[in-house]
Amino acid sequence: VQLQASGGGSVQPGGSLRLSCSASGFALDDYAIGWFRQAPGKEREGVSCISSDGSRSYADSMKGRFAISRDNAKNTVYLQINNLKPEDTAVYSCTMDFSRFCSTQGGNYVYTPGNEYEYWGQGTLVTVSS
């Protein structure tokens, strides 16, 4: 099982990026795929998740500027980030733990790191500055 995030870069505030999460060893639509980010000196923060049935959820603080999608033919999950802000600067990684459905509470994505079944790949750095 391997996950690889890509598509990060340096952008100015207000810009947009589309991050990609590709997988090898399994089909992404068989499981829930989540995104988390980690800023320097901070803990991991859940961003969004797409379940095997295509249902989408977002962390409460991430609603509005983030959009998750999946292309089954390309075995890739995307995270579109619009109106980027300096506080979005972080390494973004995709993750899975063999669950079919995203963990949610009140309709919001809940990411709990440290699951013994969790896999995540090399992240991609997003830097937002003017």
Image (spheres, grey):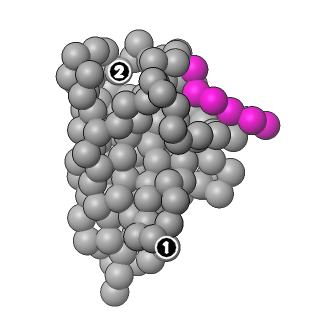
Location of residue 105 by image quarter: top right
Residue 45: x and y in percent read 54, 54
Whether 64 is drawn above or below 22: the answer is below
Q: Label 1, secondary structure: give it.
A: helix
The answer to whether any part of residue 8 appears in the image is yes
Residue 20: x and y in percent read 29, 42
Determine the main secondary structure of the stretch shown in magenta: loop
Q: Which residue extends farthest bottom?
A: 130
The magenta stretch spans residue 33: no
The span picked out in magenta is 101-106
Mark 2 lies on residue = 28
Give the residue at x 52% y 59%: 43
The answer to whether any part of residue 84 appears in the image is no
Q: Amino acid at mark 1?
A: Glu
State how far apart marks 2 and 1 are (Cα): 29 Å
Mark 1 lies on residue = 87
Whether 107 is drawn above or below 36: the answer is above
Give the residue at x 58% y 27%: 102
Q: Label 2, secondary structure: give it.
A: helix
